[in-house]
Structures are given as C-alpha cells and as structure tokens.
Amino acid sequence: MQEFDFYINLKKPTLGLYVKRGAGLPDLADAGDWQLSGPVAQSELTPELLKGLAANGHVFQELGA
C-alpha cells in the first residue's frame, strides 16, 4: 500500500499538505513553514485527496479547527 508524507503549516496549523512519500518540499518557497507530521497510508485518504495527489504529486487540505 502506498504511503504519503503529511506536513503541517506552522504558521497556519489548520492547513495540511500531503506529498508522495520521500518527495520533500523542494518547490515550496515557504518550505520552512512546514513541519513533517509523519506518514499516512493511502487507505486513510479520501478519493478527492488521492485524485489530487495523482494529478499533482501533492495536495493541500484545510483541517478542522
């Protein structure tokens, strides 16, 4: 089963970012604002998130307050 890395934005903790496992954040200008929270299994993600990951290699998610 595929896993993804999940990052939390330190300046806006209600914003999460999923990327392909091991990809890191090389294209983000504000990469220092993100902290790796840990791996997430594919089965834990919604179909919408998986679609975004497949299309873009990453996907942002607004987290509940």
Image: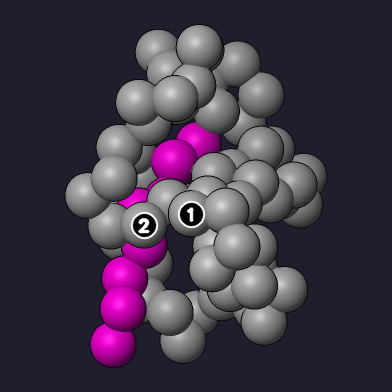
Left/right of residue 60 with respect to residue 9 in the rendered view: right
Left/right of residue 3 with respect to residue 65 in the rendered view: left
**Residue type beneath disc 2:** Lys
**Residue type beneath disc 1:** Gly
Residue marked by disc 2: 20
Q: State the SS at label 2.
A: strand
Residue 7, percent from left and from top: 44, 41
Residue 43, percent from left and from top: 46, 86
Q: Are marks 2 and 1 in contact (CB under 8 Å)?
A: yes
Q: Quadrant location of residue 50?
A: bottom right
Q: Quadrant of the C terminus?
A: top right
Q: Quadrant location of residue 54?
A: bottom right
Q: Quadrant of the N terminus?
A: bottom left
Q: State the SS at label 1.
A: loop
- Residue closest to the eye, 23 or 63: 23
Residue 2, percent from left and from top: 31, 78
